[in-house]
Image (cartoon, rainbow, N blue to C red):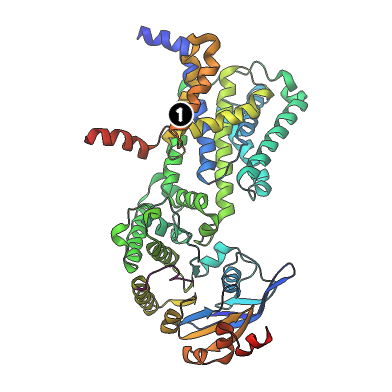
């Protein structure tokens, strides 16, 4: 579904990603893990069009992504959440979610100007859908609250509902459980499982190993801008290169 | 009705100026609601005023045609300068648009065969009736009220809060900024065209930096949370100097002091429903 081939990114002389290649298969949960500063969020920023790659190809459902503006990429069916939450804090929850439906509201100028039936019907449907999406993440009863008043974990869930509102085929989650307590993590895990059962493909970056191993069917490991391993959770767990990247090598101490 | 005739004979100009200032405040409110601090509205007002006046005086156009010209010219100017400047944000956009305002002023000064240069345009036919101003204000308010409740208004608000998140919601950020900028320019141009046909005379100094700051002050003072704020702000900024007339030499000082007090105690503007509810709602409960 999503295919990265020999993608690289340099910021001046600093090479952040080198020859990154992997494929996110349709209908699965795919994970990208790696130590801090490995370049994981940069991968997301390249895919969503926020920054341009220095080389390589990124294809989504057969279409080249680099060179397209972020809102065009979103409209192809690709949505994301952010590691540092970026909800619209001064809006209510339901408004946040309806903003995500922007491209799917097809009424024209006469529609909103004169409040024609087509406009009212689409707005009503959007509101109903937004309530439904909020109920998926368990925030429906807070629909009218201002988003800034939510707890950290709830804000992450709201961001998830807002991303779903763009009707994506592929959902990119950037550290979805960062800063959550273990109860919230279990809850979100169930939520994400439900979302995949509804036919969405998920590609997530995550630090929490138990969370990643429990959810992902395939995992790629990024270290110092290179993919060092890719496979099923069991393969990754026993891969010597991965263990080395996370725990260090024993003879490291000898060389110091 | 005699008292009204007397009142109107004395104050009609003041009342209509409130209406025109309200249009100007709404024009900058529109760009502010999209998170843009654009300071070109005085220049757009000037472009509208000169275009409309030249249309009625030199081309013999009818008033509706002149008004349409007064809207179209600043919209065209906004579309041209918007492409390079709207990429900027915050104070950088303010600087660029202020620079544009100066360019417009100097161009009006130097194109004196058309514009009369520093002497301005004299003897503009007084075609603006009171109901023209009322109709313009009502139509603009209706337009903006409907806009706010549509996907475009939500997109503006989303862009104001976080434009990267907005673009990832599928919102074309640049196109929406351009829409807010051009529509604001059109409203400012309409205000300029109406004003020119009310006051007989326009000159380049009317559309300079001072006017730009006045327009911004009206919107910020009134409150940018809704449509009532800019209208209220325009009324206060227009009326305050008149109400303080009896203080003679202290007038400007008092005027300034009142504005400072309002900003200190009502940082979100006078029309701030949350705070008003906080003040009066709580008092009502007790």
Tell me the quarter of the image containing the N terminus of chain B.
top left
Rendering quarter of residue B60: top right
Asked if residue A84 is positioned above or below residue B46 in the image, the reply reads below
Q: Residue at x 50, y 33 (%)?
A: B219
- Look at the image and tell me whether residue B17 can be seen: no
Out of A128 and B194, give the one closest to the viewer: A128
In the picture provided, is B193 more to the left or to the right than A204? right
Where residue A147 appears, as percent x and y from the top left, is 39, 55
Rendering quarter of residue A166: bottom left
Asked if residue B100 is positioned above or below residue B122 in the image, the reply reads below
Asked if residue B158 is positioned above or below residue A213 in the image, the reply reads above
Circle 1 residues within 10 Å: few <14, some 14–19, many ≥20: some
Where residue A23 appears, as percent x and y from the top left, is 56, 83
Q: Residue at x 50, y 22 (%)?
A: B257
Q: Is residue A180 magenta?
A: yes
In the picture provided, is A121 more to the left or to the right than B17? left
Out of B144 and A42, give the one closest to the viewer: A42
Q: Is residue A87 magenta?
A: no
Where residue B69 appears, as percent x and y from the top left, is 61, 33
> Which residue is label 1 attached to?
B262
| Mark 1 belongs to chain | B
Q: Main secondary structure of the magenta part?
A: loop
- Look at the image and tell me whether residue A200 can be seen: yes
Q: Residue furthest left?
A: B286
Q: Residue at x 55, y 62 (%)?
A: A71
In the picture provided, is A79 more to the left or to the right than B205? left
Where residue B104 appears, as percent x and y from the top left, is 70, 33
Q: Residue at x 55, y 58 (%)?
A: B164
Label 1 secondary element: helix
Report the number of numbered marks.
1
**Magenta region:** A174-182
């Amino acid at each position: 579904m999503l295919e990265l081939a020999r993608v690289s990114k340099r910021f001046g002389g600093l090479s952040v990603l080198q020859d990154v290649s992997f494929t996110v298969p349709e209908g699965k949960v795919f994970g990208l893990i790696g130590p801090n500063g490995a370049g994981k969020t940069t991968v997301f920023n390249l895919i969503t069009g926020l920054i341009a790659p220095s080389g390589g190809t990124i294809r989504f459902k057969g279409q080249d992504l680099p060179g397209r503006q972020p809102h065009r990429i979103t409209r192809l069916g690709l949505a994301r959440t952010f590691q540092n939450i970026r909800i619209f804090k001064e809006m209510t929850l339901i408004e946040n979610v309806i903003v995500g439906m922007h491209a799917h509201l097809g009424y024209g100028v006469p529609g909103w100007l004169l409040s024609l039936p087509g406009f009212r019907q689409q707005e009503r449907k959007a509101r109903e859908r937004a309530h439904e999406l909020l109920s998926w993440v368990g925030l429906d009863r807070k629909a009218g609250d201002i988003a800034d008043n939510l707890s950290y974990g709830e804000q992450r869930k709201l961001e998830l509902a807002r991303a779903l509102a763009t009707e994506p085929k592929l959902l990119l989650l950037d550290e979805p459980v960062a800063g959550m307590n273990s109860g919230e993590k279990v809850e979100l895990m169930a939520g994400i499982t439900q979302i995949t059962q509804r036919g969405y493909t998920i590609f997530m970056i995550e630090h929490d190993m138990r969370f990643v191993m429990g959810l992902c069917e395939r995992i790629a490991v990024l270290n110092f801008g290179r993919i060092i391993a890719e496979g099923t959770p069991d393969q990754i767990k026993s891969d010597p290169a991965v263990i080395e990247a996370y725990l260090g090598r024993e003879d490291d101490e000898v060389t110091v | 009705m005699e008292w009204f005739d007397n009142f109107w004979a004395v104050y009609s100009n003041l009342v209509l100026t409130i209406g025109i200032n309200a249009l100007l405040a709404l024009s900058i409110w529109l760009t502010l609601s999209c998170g843009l601090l654009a300071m070109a509205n005085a220049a757009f007002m000037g472009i509208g005023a000169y275009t409309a006046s030249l249309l009625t005086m030199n081309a013999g156009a009818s008033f509706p045609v002149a008004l349409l010209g007064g809207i179209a010219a600043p919209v065209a100017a906004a579309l041209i300068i918007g492409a390079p400047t709207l990429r900027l944000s915050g104070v950088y956009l303010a600087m660029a648009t202020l620079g544009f305002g100066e360019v417009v002023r100097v161009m009006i000064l130097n194109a004196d065969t058309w514009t009369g240069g520093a002497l301005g345009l004299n003897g503009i036919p007084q075609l603006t009736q009171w109901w023209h101003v009322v109709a313009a204000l009502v139509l603009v308010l209706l337009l903006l009220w409907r806009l706010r409740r549509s996907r475009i208004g939500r997109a503006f608000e989303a862009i104001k809060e976080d434009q990267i998140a907005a673009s990832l919601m599928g919102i074309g950020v640049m196109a929406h900024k351009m829409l807010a900028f051009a529509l604001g320019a059109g409203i400012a141009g309409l205000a300029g065209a109406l004003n020119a046909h009310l006051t007989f005379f326009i000159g380049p100094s009317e559309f300079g930096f001072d006017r730009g700051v006045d327009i911004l002050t009206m919107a910020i003072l009134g409150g940018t949370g809704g449509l009532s704020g800019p209208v209220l702000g325009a009324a206060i900024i227009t009326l305050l100097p008149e109400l303080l007339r009896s203080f003679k030499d202290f007038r400007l000082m008092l005027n300034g002091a009142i504005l400072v007090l309002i900003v200190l105690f009502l940082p979100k503007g006078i029309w701030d429903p949350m705070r008003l509810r906080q003040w009066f709602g709580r008092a009502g409960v007790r």
